[in-house]
């Protein structure tokens, strides 16, 4: 069976993809693929390819075709928004356009075959890969856009992955290192395995392959078919190239890399994993039949050079393209699939298939020359949650997918921004998702990356497709810094079966060239099992030194914090005291004001009351003044009359006396009658006058009564006033109590001052303890020899460093703080 492709096919394909198209004419991409100078090689724009998927029969029947995507030329595609899309609605509202033009490194239309696509997009990367440059290809697009089809293809129509594998194996044919005793390790190291470990590797491989044994035959046939199909294509037309073209191609590459003229061999290792819901799973782990058993989650770690790798990921040695395809199939079986409404076989995880090529010298005891890695990443569909109508687990998946793709977009945008020297460099959030963490080296010059943007022409997913295109437009502007001498950048560190470094094979690579372990951030998840004994000792010493320095800085920090806290507390107490005394003053003022106003109020009330009472009494006995005057006049008239009458009476009496002696002139009878009449008149007048006098006396008595009542009212008012005065004295007593309260507060403040003094004495104690501690440390360090030699010098050095000064400073500061307290205390007094 023709399982293995034709001997010359690999190099033929490489040659063909590099220089010729089917008709043997220069390839349209030739200029971009083969850079002439190292400078050109060093900085290249990120390659972004667009592949437009053809309509299926069912889609055509559903009238999905509305001419949304038009391919203008080999680099340009135009998107015209269909009526139903949000883009049209937005453009009607004046937001955005309904037609967008996007340019790509190359646009592949719906009619493009898998073979044409491979030739057009992958030749550059695969060619660089076999020359030792790492490569990453990832497909980006909405669900059902043809990402998996592009990477894996179907059993009859292989995608870029099996084709690349085929090219690689054809490339190394006859130079394959079949033993499994050199295995990829960490991010770019190689581990030399012991005999027993090799057996273990063989057992693992058999177990993995056994899970797909029954399908071997069909895969073999497929690969044979592929070659059969290809026999009519450009690749197989080159079968007729001389068989030594492979060697011719291979040897110069090694010369380029190693400057050594011996022949090389290659060993191929494969891994397949997926990132599902931000967890990394090995797709080559043999799954248990029990559904309850959970898959093992793998961790992403970083080696000493800061390169990310997946810890405990299985690497399987493959010796043919068909074995590689079997492993792909096994991984696919394990991959998480879930049905969304958009694609019945939609992959809801990002899958990463990696091929590591170890290059070894062709000797009985081979040396490792280099390691290169080619990864194919099939990203999950980029549709947003609302579109998929997902719920529960599906919604969580969609959220995680969107998040990791969003971070990928952010990284790409930040990379683009950082290229602009006029703009402020921005943080690239590689570490925010597992996906970007693994991709980071490719965007930082440690390999070539290329993006394949897959789109379908569906009306229903137009808005999502537009989003994908916008992402690609940004990605296309990113410039990749590619280190031309990739192996020099990625020195293959070789470790033995016990993970200790054994030999650094390449004479060009000095031990010093390895990244310094101290460069590794302590925050990273560093796998210390990778370190040799010496490295571990060195790391321990470094860590000890760091620990001492850290402790010293922590102590200084603690002292500083304590001092700051004491100062802050003191300030706070002073502020509180001031606030309280202000409050007390305010209260006192306000109470006094209130008291005075109350006092005034009572005074007013009493006055009012007295006035009202007086008015009431006056009203009761009110005699209008005119009447009173008239009465007085009458009284005066009467008194005058009385006086006149008394006068007349006196005169009459005189006359009567005179009449006692007989007057011969006056007859006696007439005189008597006259006298009687006069007496009677006088009597009546006298009686009238007495009556009037009584009345007047009555009036005088009544007026006296009134005066007496008024006096009583006045007495009552006096009583009210006395009560007010009593209240007033009570209020004064309250003020006195408040004054006492204030005095107690002042006493409190004094106590605070005392406390402050206690704090400063405690600080003093602390300083002494610290001094004691440093002396103890010093003693301990003296006791330790060898490992802590560096530490000793560090501590000695610190005696005259800011630490020592720090103590003095602290002392000064605390004494100044004390002085401050005493001064405050004095001022208070
Ligand atoms: N270029 C193409 N020619 C013919 N058929 C294609 C092409 N691209 C994709 N298809 C078909 O379209 C369907 C969806 O493709 P595929 O599964 O690769 O999409 P996807 O983007 O990987 O989706 P998901 O993200 O859900 O995995 C498949 O049936 C596939 O065979």
Image (cartoon, grey):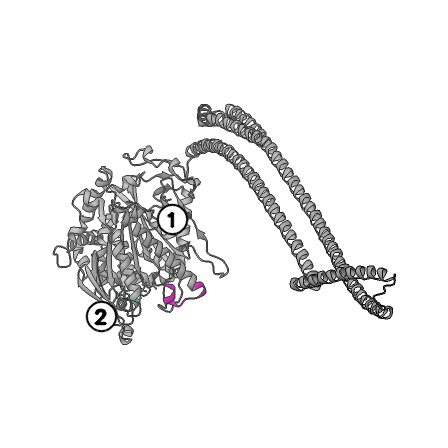
296 or 506, nearer to the observer: 296
Looking at the rendering, the stretch of residues picked out in magenta corresponds to: 383-393
Q: CB under 8 Å between callouts 1 and 2?
A: no
Magenta residue check for 390: yes
Q: Residue 331 appears at what percent x and percent y?
A: 38, 58
Residue 659 vertical placement versus 311 (above, below) = below
Residue tagged by mark 1?
431
Q: Is residue 674 left or right of residue 490?
A: right
- Mark 1–mark 2 Cα distance, whole angstroms, equals 40 Å
Q: Residue 494 appears at what percent x and percent y?
A: 35, 39
Q: Dot 1, crowdedness within 10 Å: few (<14), some or many (≥20)? A: few
Residue tagged by mark 2?
67
Magenta residue check for 222: no
Q: Residue 364 appears at what percent x and percent y?
A: 30, 39
Q: Secondary structure at mark 2?
A: loop
Image quadrant of ligand 1 equals: bottom left
**Mark closer to the chain start, 1 or 2:** 2
> Can residue 592 be seen in this snapshot?
yes
């Amino acid at each position: 069976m023709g399982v293995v492709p034709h001997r010359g096919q690999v190099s033929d394909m490489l040659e063909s993809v590099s220089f010729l198209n089917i008709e043997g004419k220069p390839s349209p991409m030739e200029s971009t693929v083969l850079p002439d100078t190292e400078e050109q090689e060093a900085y290249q724009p990120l390659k972004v390819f667009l592949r437009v998927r053809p309509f299926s029969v069912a889609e055509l029947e559903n009238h999905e075709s509305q001419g949304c995507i038009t391919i203008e030329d080999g680099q340009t595609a135009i998107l015209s928004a269909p009526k139903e899309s949000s883009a049209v609605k937005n453009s009607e509202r004046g937001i955005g356009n309904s037609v967008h033009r996007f340019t790509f490194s190359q646009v592949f239309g719906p009619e493009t075959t898998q073979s044409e696509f491979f030739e057009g997009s992958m030749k550059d990367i695969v060619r660089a890969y076999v020359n030792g440059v790492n490569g990453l290809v990832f497909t980006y697009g909405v669900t059902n856009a043809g990402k998996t089809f592009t990477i894996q293809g179907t059993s009859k129509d292989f995608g870029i992955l099996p084709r690349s594998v085929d090219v690689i194996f054809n490339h190394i044919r006859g130079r394959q290192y079949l033993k499994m005793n050199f295995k990829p390790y960490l991010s770019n190291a190689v581990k030399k395995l012991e005999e027993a470990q090799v057996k273990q590797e063989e057992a693992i491989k058999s177990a993995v392959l056994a899970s797909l044994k029954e399908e071997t035959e069909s895969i073999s046939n497929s690969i044979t078919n592929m070659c059969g199909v290809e026999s009519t294509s450009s690749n197989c037309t080159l079968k007729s190239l001389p068989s030594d073209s492979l060697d011719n191609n291979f040897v110069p590459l090694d010369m380029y890399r190693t400057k050594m003229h011996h022949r090389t061999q290659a060993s191929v290792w494969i891994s397949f994993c997926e990132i599902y819901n931000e967890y990394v799973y090995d797709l080559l782990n043999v799954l248990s039949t029990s559904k309850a058993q959970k898959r093992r989650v793998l961790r992403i770690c970083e080696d000493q050079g800061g390169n990310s790798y997946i810890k405990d990921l299985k690497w399987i040695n493959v010796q043919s393209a068909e074995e590689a395809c079997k492993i792909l199939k096994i991984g696919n079986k394990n991959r998480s699939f879930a049905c969304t409404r958009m694609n019945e076989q939609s992959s809801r995880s990002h899958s990463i298939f990696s091929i590591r090529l170890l290059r070894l010298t062709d000797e009985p005891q081979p040396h490792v020359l280099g390691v290169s890695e080619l990864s194919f990443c099939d990203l999950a569909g980029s549709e947003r949650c609302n579109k998929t109508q997902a719920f529960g687990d599906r919604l969580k998946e969609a959220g995680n997918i969107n998040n990791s793709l969003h971070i990928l977009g952010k990284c790409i945008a930040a990379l683009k921004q950082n290229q602009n020297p006029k703009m402020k460099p921005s943080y690239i959030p590689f570490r925010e998702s597992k996906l970007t963490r693994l991709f980071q080296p490719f965007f930082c010059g440690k390999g070539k990356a290329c993006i394949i943007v897959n789109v379908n022409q569906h009306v229903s997913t137009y808005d999502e497709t537009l989003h994908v295109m916008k992402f690609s437009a940004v990605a296309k502007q990113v410039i990749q810094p590619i280190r031309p001498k990739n192996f020099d950048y990625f020195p293959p560190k070789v470790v033995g079966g016990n993970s200790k470094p054994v030999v650094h094979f390449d004479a060009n690579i000095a031990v010093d060239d390895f990244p310094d372990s101290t460069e590794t951030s302590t925050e990273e998840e560093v796998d210390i099992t990778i370190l040799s004994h010496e490295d571990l000792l060195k790391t321990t010493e470094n860590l000890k030194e760091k620990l001492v320095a850290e402790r010293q800085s922590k102590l200084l920090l603690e002292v500083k914090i304590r001092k700051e806290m004491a100062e802050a507390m003191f300030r706070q107490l002073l502020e509180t005291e001031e606030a309280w005394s202000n409050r007390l003053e305010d209260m006192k003022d306000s109470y006094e004001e209130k008291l005075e106003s109350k006092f005034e109020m009572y005074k007013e009330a009493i006055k009012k009351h007295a006035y009202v009472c007086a008015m009431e009494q006056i009203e009761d006995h009110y005699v209008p003044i005119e009447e009173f005057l008239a009465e007085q006049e009458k009284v005066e008239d009467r008194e005058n009359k009385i006086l006149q009458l008394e006068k007349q009476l006196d005169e009459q009496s005189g006359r009567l006396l005179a009449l006692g002696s007989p007057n011969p002139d006056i007859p006696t009878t007439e005189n008597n009658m006259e006298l009687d009449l006069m007496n009677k008149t006088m009597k009546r007048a006298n009686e009238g006058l007495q009556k009037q006098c009584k009345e007047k006396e009555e009036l005088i008595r009544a007026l006296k009564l009134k005066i007496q009542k008024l006096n009583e009212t006045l007495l009552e008012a006096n009583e009210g006033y006395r009560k007010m005065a009593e209240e007033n004295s009570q209020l004064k007593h309250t003020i006195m109590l408040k004054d006492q309260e204030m005095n107690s507060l002042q006493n409190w403040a004094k106590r605070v001052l005392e406390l402050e003094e206690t704090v400063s004495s405690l600080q003093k104690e602390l300083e002494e303890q610290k001094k004691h501690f440093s002396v103890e440390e010093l003693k301990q360090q003296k006791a330790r020899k060898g490992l802590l030699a560096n530490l000793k010098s560090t501590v000695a050095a610190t005696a005259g460093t800011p630490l020592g000064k720090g103590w003095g400073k602290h002392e000064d500061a605390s004494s100044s703080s004390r002085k401050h307290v005493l001064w405050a205390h004095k001022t208070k007094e």
